[in-house]
Image (cartoon, grey):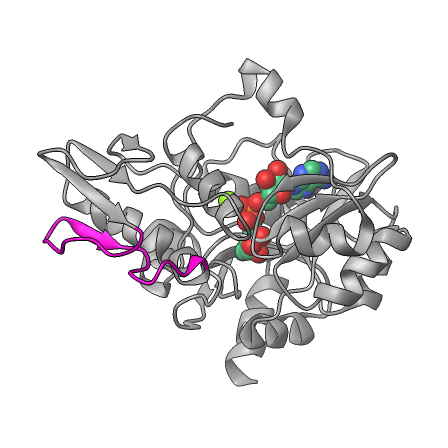
Amino acid sequence: MGRASELARALSAGDLIILPTETVYGLAADAASPAAVAQLYEAKGRPRFNPLISHVGDLDAALGIADLDDRARVLANAFWPGPLTIVAPYRMGGGVCDLARAGLNTVAVRVPAHPLARQVLKAFGGPIVAPSANRSGRPSPTTFADAMAETGAFTAAALDGGPCPVGLESTVVALLDGPPRLLRPGAVTRAVMEALIGPLAEAEADAKRSPGRLTRHYAPSAPVRLAAGAPAPGEAYLAFGPAPEGPHVFNLSPSRDLAEAATRLFTYLRAADALAPRAIAVAPIPEEGLGEAINDRLRRAAGFVG
Ligand code: TXA
Ligand code: MG
């Protein structure tokens, strides 16, 4: 608990910290402090209209900041602690500052499963905002070294939790008026949620219709070429399934295991990018289960979705 209380003290002092979670590393701040949250947006280079996720220790704490309807509670009971973020009406006075919510009357809340994140939440006692610890528009860090290289310089303290076991950001689902909407696919898959609460509206239908929101996200420096059967000369290659080995080949999963591919995706995008290739070619990934989340991140890396 020693390190956890040290990190909690840094948060109370208005400082930023690097916080491991089961999905990706977070750059964390006290959700109640506009000054700390402003510093966080600054460190990430993140536009202030993009709201943050509030992390809390348990369902009770979530109910202190968000009005969770029956559907939200079913999902919370099934998947918390874990890689699911619920967007719900904000409960006024809940202690998440306006800036953290980008001025919206909704809030994104999640209960992380990583033991170190849980210790820090317990020691701190209030909601902690934590976007992925990358600089805005770059791949999320899934190792301590990558997190430190991205935003470590802006922090007062950091915790090494080892490689993140999930490797992709949490699933984000909105439970507001009307049907549930899948805002970001993730480790909690569409199918398991639909089995519990019925059909989810199309992911990011609004963003796809609005060209103003088409930006390159999660992006390495090299261009990304999707659904590539093999690399062209000068390209690095992210393989999936049996493939020839080589210095420029990174196999996401020789056995075609989507969970394994998810844990490796961002690390391999970074490693491939470090070779300064002409492009990063990526093998086709099936659009089923976790494949929906992996393909979502790949399409963003390639610049197809905002
Ligand atoms: O796995 C994760 O969720 C990681 C770890 C650190 O917990 N965090 C993370 O945060 O991925 P970030 O900030 O990179 O992504 C938060 C996503 C963004 O797409 C943001 O637009 C959305 O959640 N979001 C946050 N609040 C929202 C709200 N009130 N309404 C709609 N979307 C919201
Ligand atoms: Mg992010």
Residue shown at 80% from the left, 47% from the top: 198
Q: Is residue 256 magenta?
A: yes
Task: Report the predominant secondary structure element of the magenta stretch.
Answer: loop
Q: From the viewer's perspective, is residue 85 above or below residue 57?
A: above
Residue shown at 10% from the left, 35% from the top: 234
In depth, the one of 101 and 112 nearer the eye is 112
Residue 107 percent coordinates (x, y): 75, 45
Q: From the viewer's perspective, is residue 113 above or below residue 297?
A: below
- Left or right: residue 65 compared with residue 277: right
In depth, the one of 112 and 269 nearer the eye is 269
Of all residues, the one furthest to the bottom in this rendering is 1
Residue 277 percent coordinates (x, y): 15, 37
Residue shown at 61% from the left, 70% from the top: 113
Count of labels in the image:
0
Image quarter (top left, top right, bottom left or bottom right) of the N terminus: bottom right
Q: Quadrant of residue 62?
A: bottom right
- Left or right: residue 70 compared with residue 114: right
Q: Quadrant of residue 127?
A: bottom right
Residue shown at 81% from the left, 51% from the top: 197
Magenta highlight range: 240-258
Q: Is residue 29 magenta?
A: no
In depth, the one of 138 and 230 nearer the eye is 230
Residue 180 percent coordinates (x, y): 79, 41
Residue 155 percent coordinates (x, y): 44, 57
- One can see residue 109 in this view: no
